[in-house]
Image (spheres, helix red, strand yellow):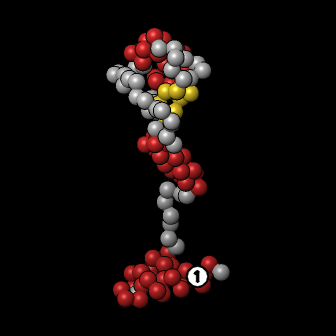
Amino acid sequence: MRWRNAKTYRSIDGRDGVALKEWLRQNKQVKKVTRDRAGAYAKAISEALPEAMQIADRFHLHQNLLTAIKDALNGVIPNEILIPNKIMEYEKTAPPETKTEEKAAEYKKNRI
């Protein structure tokens, strides 16, 4: 999303939020602040300008989405998927050219 008439007023140095907090206290006219995921920035903005809208940039929105997807999948998909002994034994003895097709058929047969 692009803000109409959006301007970059200032890029603040530092990672602890101290400089940002001081700058915001001197610039109370600020209504929207784009920031990364640093908790120190969120805290500084909330303390200096509690009514200001905090906006995540696209990179960090994607990062948040990927983290949420990863966390959701980790809760559903096991870390390790064990293959039944039958299939493992078959893999050891079957000719290489037939392993994939026959294994798939065997798996489907046993699954139903």
Is residue 92 placed above or below 51 in the rendered structure? Answer: below
Name the residue carrying label 1: 108
In the displayed image of the protein, which residue is found farthest to the right? 112
Is residue 62 visible in the rendered structure shown here? Answer: yes
Provide residue 85's location: percent of width, then percent of height.
Answer: 50, 75
Residue sitting at x 45%, y 76%: 88
- 93 or 17, which lies in front? 17
Quick one: label 1, few (<14), some, or many (20+) residues within 10 Å?
A: few
Q: Is residue 93 left or right of residue 67?
A: left
Kindly identify the amino acid type of the residue bearing the numbered disc 1: Lys
Assign a secondary structure to mark 1.
helix
Name the side, left or right, on which 97 lies relative to 81: left
Q: Which part of the image, by quadrant, shows the C terminus?
A: bottom right
Q: Residue furthest front?
A: 5
Q: Position of residue 72 (x, y in %)?
A: 57, 50
Q: Which percent across, then down, holds residue 11? A: 36, 25
| Picture layout, residue 50 above or below residue 104 | above
Percent across and percent down for residue 65 are 52, 46
Q: Residue at x 50, y 66 (%)?
A: 82
Identity of the residue drawn at 46% across and 42% down: 58
Q: As rendered, which of 76 and 49 lies closer to the eye? A: 49
Which residue occupies the foreground of this view, 102 or 28?
A: 28
The quarter holding residue 106 reads bottom right
Q: Is residue 93 above or below residue 71?
A: below
Residue under the point 39% across and 15% down: 19
Seen in the picture, residue 94 relative to 82 is either above or below; the reply is below
